């Protein structure tokens, strides 16, 4: 699956989201061949909603960023489903569209949290994309469990420059350098076992107060 770049501006968000939506539209159209009415309805909903959103975003880009490059694909983020049918089609769509939606959710949330939206219309749009696609993710996960016994969450995409919160840190912090301790008795327990006090290399488990 293609990798999205971190959102650095309102223009960046819109120019990335247009081809991202277009990928979802192309894949969702394949669900017209599904034997499950639920999947056909899901596909039609994605096509209808995101086609209108693409038109809206392209209009904003023409209006507000006429001198900037037009959106262009940065590599597909959905597989070709045209050769699949039946359960294979439905399962492959769900397994790939869930992380695809998660990517849009993360991009929208990043735009909002970092305050990159210049126009209130784009902020409202990002909130709608985030909330609508989160609801669709819940529906698709339920279908995976109900029809295919899939209990685990499909792989969530990685946004290389997106700064996660403290509880979501993707890159472990390097262990703190150890300060040599004066020699004591030869029977002194290891630092991390002494009186159950975490040693230096366990400092990440000791709550600390972060300073801005």
Image (tube, grey):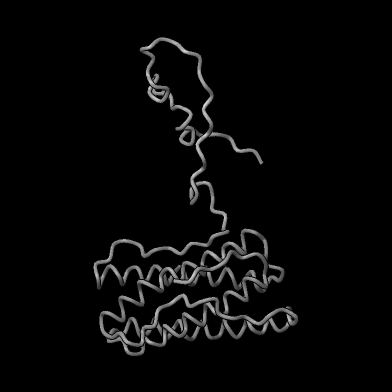
Position of 20 with respect to 187 (left or right) is: right
The answer to which of 155 and 139 lies nearer the viewer is: 155
The answer to which of 78 and 133 lies nearer the viewer is: 78
Residue 42's x, y, as percent?
39, 81
Position of 67 with respect to 81 (left or right) is: right
Residue 172's x, y, as percent?
48, 45
Residue 187's x, y, as percent?
36, 12
State which quarter of the image contains the N terminus: bottom left
Residue 141, compared with residue 211, is above or below; it is below
**Residue at image x 52%, y 62%?**
159
Farthest residue, direction top:
185
**Residue at image x 42%, y 83%?**
27
Dividing the picture into quarters, in which one does residue 129 lie? bottom right
How many numbered dots are placed on residues in this image? Answer: 0
The answer to which of 181 and 123 lies nearer the viewer is: 181
Position of 152 with respect to 26 (left or right) is: left
State which quarter of the image contains the C terminus: top right
**Residue at image x 46%, y 64%?**
157
Position of 141 with respect to 173 (left or right) is: left
**Residue at image x 47%, y 13%?**
183
């Amino acid at each position: 699956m293609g990798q999205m770049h971190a959102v650095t501006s309102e223009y960046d968000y819109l120019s990335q989201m247009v081809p991202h939506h277009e990928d979802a539209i192309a894949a969702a159209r394949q669900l017209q061949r599904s034997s499950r009415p639920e999947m056909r309805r899901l596909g039609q909903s994605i096509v209808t909603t995101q086609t209108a959103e693409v038109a809206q975003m392209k209009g904003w880009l023409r209006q507000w960023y006429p001198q900037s490059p037009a959106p262009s694909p940065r590599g597909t983020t959905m597989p070709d489903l045209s050769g699949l049918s039946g359960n294979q089609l439905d399962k492959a769509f769900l397994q790939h569209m869930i992380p695809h939606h998660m990517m849009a959710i993360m991009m929208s949330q990043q735009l909002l949290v970092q305050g990159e939206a210049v126009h209130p219309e784009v902020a409202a749009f990002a909130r709608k994309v985030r909330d609508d696609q989160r609801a669709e993710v819940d529906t698709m996960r339920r279908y995976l469990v109900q029809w295919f016994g899939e209990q685990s969450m499909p792989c969530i995409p990685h946004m290389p420059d997106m700064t996660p919160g403290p509880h979501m840190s993707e890159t472990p912090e390097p262990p703190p350098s150890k300060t040599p301790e004066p020699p004591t008795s030869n029977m002194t327990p290891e630092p991390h076992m002494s009186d159950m006090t975490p040693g230096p290399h366990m400092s990440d488990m000791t709550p600390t107060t972060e300073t801005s």
